[in-house]
Image (spheres, helix red, strand yellow):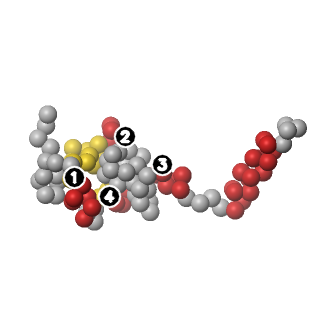
Amino acid sequence: MKNEKCLSCGSSTSLIHIFKKGTSIGTSEDFSKKMICTDCLDDSDDYSYCELCGEEEGAYRIRDLSDGYCAEHYDEVTPVDDDEADAWESLAEYYSDPSH
């Protein structure tokens, strides 16, 4: 096992992987060699985690998050415009109609 330490304080406990710079939808293949402990992550101005992925997935550079979400989850939580909402409602009505 590697001697992994927090990039900020040097702690070797409660570590979270940091995704590579520019990663928008992280998987374990996207981990950088850097790690950060949960205490430093809570205080960091440079790193955070996706609000939906949580700490279990890994930390992102803040500039790689949109409103606190990775690209995958940002699309899930972003409100749709009225035209798109109307289109989804029409499609749902179409499929719920027994004559179709």
Disc 4/disc 1 C-alpha distance (Å):
10 Å
Tell me the kind of residue under disc 4.
Answer: Ser
Going from N to C along the chain, the mark reached first, 3 or 2, is 2
Q: Which residue is mark 1?
A: 36
Q: Which mark is residue 72?
A: 3
Q: Quadrant of residue 96?
A: top right
Tell me the kind of residue under disc 1.
Answer: Ile
Disc 3/disc 2 C-alpha distance (Å):
11 Å
Q: Which residue is mark 2?
A: 27
Image coords of residue 29 (percent x, y): 32, 37
Residue 20 can be seen, yes or no: no
Nearer the observer: mark 1 or 3; the answer is 1
Q: Residue at x 16, y 48 (%)?
A: 13
Tell me the kind of residue under disc 3.
Answer: Glu
Q: Is residue 8 shown above or below 20?
A: below
What secondary structure is marked by label 4? strand
In which quadrant is the C terminus drawn? top right
Q: Which mark is residue 48?
A: 4
Image coords of residue 72 (percent x, y): 48, 48
- Relative placement, left or right, of 69 versus 93 is left
Q: Residue at x 37, y 51 (%)?
A: 54
Going from N to C along the chain, the mark reached first, 2 or 4, is 2
What secondary structure is marked by label 2? loop
